[in-house]
Amino acid sequence: MNRQHPIPTNVITGFLGAGKTTLIQHLLKTKPADEHWAVLVNEFGEVGLDGALLAAEGIAVKEVPGGCMCCTTSLPSKSAMNQLIEQQNPDRILIEPTGLAHPKQILQSFGGKAYQGILDMHAVVCVLDPWSLSDDQFLALPAFRDQIQLADVLIATKSDTSAPEHLARFDTFAASLKPMKSQIGKISQGNMPWQWLDAPRVKQTVILTTPASHSGASSSDVAERDSDGVLRQENKTDYGYSCGWLFPETFVFNFEGLKTLLSELEVPRIKAVMQTDKGWFSFNRMRENFQAKETTSIGESRLEVVSMEPVDWRGQDNKLRLLSS
């Protein structure tokens, strides 16, 4: 992979539901028209939902399912990166790791000797929901704190819907960080200027709270499809649990029943693109904020649920099947 010029590469980090995918979608819509950008996506779950959504928009995407990118010895992530470079020859690469990943290992992996002359690591962008700074559960997580500390650009998302006191807390928090960030901002709908990707790197002199050898993810065994063609795969780390489903195109879900189930399930994070009796819909849930929007088909219905506590995944599986025809 000999190149004349290294590829500018940015890590877009942020905890669960902070708005990483929305930010990337905006950046790809507003980038220089003569440039070809590509995305390396690593999801905590197993069904590659974010990758499927981006690919459906015609974006050049390579996936590393299962939350494994943050391990410096991760052969799947390096293989995916190599394929992305070979196949797309992009002018810039955006790396979207799982919200539970630690960015230090990613920077070590793709900013090390193996990619010298191939990748040029530019600003690390961390997005966060201002609300999270008022939640002790988030503030206690080492990965959450270290994502913020390692960022060169710190962005508060959802500024249009956040409470004024949460935005004020973000301002105070961001101003207190040492060393200072190259760029701090508040955005809505992912509308960060793409030029901020080239903000100067911040020299880090702090000791991070998560050991560099910690990968942050532990995938379950490879799942197989059942007799109905459904794949269900679970995953867990020290910080949370997830379960992902892939449903064949023969599964058509009752829209109202599905909407009720996903909006009332006591978990903090749900993402889905499902075929219903009213057409294809995307479902997005972050805490009490729930949205259902019409979308285009991505082939198979995909659902990812993330929780900080154990969940009866088999019971949820049964409820989902009862809603399908």
Image (cartoon, grey):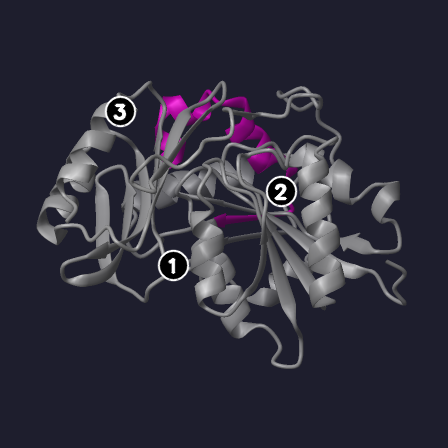
State which tag comes first along the sequence, 1 or 2. Answer: 2
* 65 over 121 or under it: above or below: above
290 left or right of 59 in image:
left
Residue type indicated by callout 1: Ser
State which tag comes first along the sequence, 3 or 2. Answer: 2
What x and y, as percent, mark residue 24?
A: 51, 59
Q: CA distance from mark 1 to mark 2?
A: 19 Å
- Answer whether residue 136 is magenta in the image: yes
Instruction: Give SS at disc 2.
Output: loop
Discs 3/2, front: 3
Q: Which dot marks residue 151? A: 2
Q: Residues within 10 Å of mark 2 (few under 14, many from 20)?
A: many
Instruction: Give SS at disc 3.
Output: helix
* 65 over 62 or under it: above or below: above
The residue lying at 40 percent from left, 33 percent from top is: 133
State which tag comes first along the sequence, 1 or 3. Answer: 1
* 256 over 265 or under it: above or below: below
What x and y, as percent, mark residue 77?
A: 67, 42
Q: Nearer the viewer, residue 320 or 73?
A: 320
Q: How many marks?
A: 3
What x and y, as percent, mark residue 181?
A: 63, 45
* Secondary structure that dominates the magenta span: helix
Residue type indicated by callout 3: Arg
What x and y, as percent, mark residue 211?
A: 67, 19
179 left or right of 188 in image:
right
* Stretch of the chain drawn in magenta: 132-155
221 left or right of 298 in image:
right
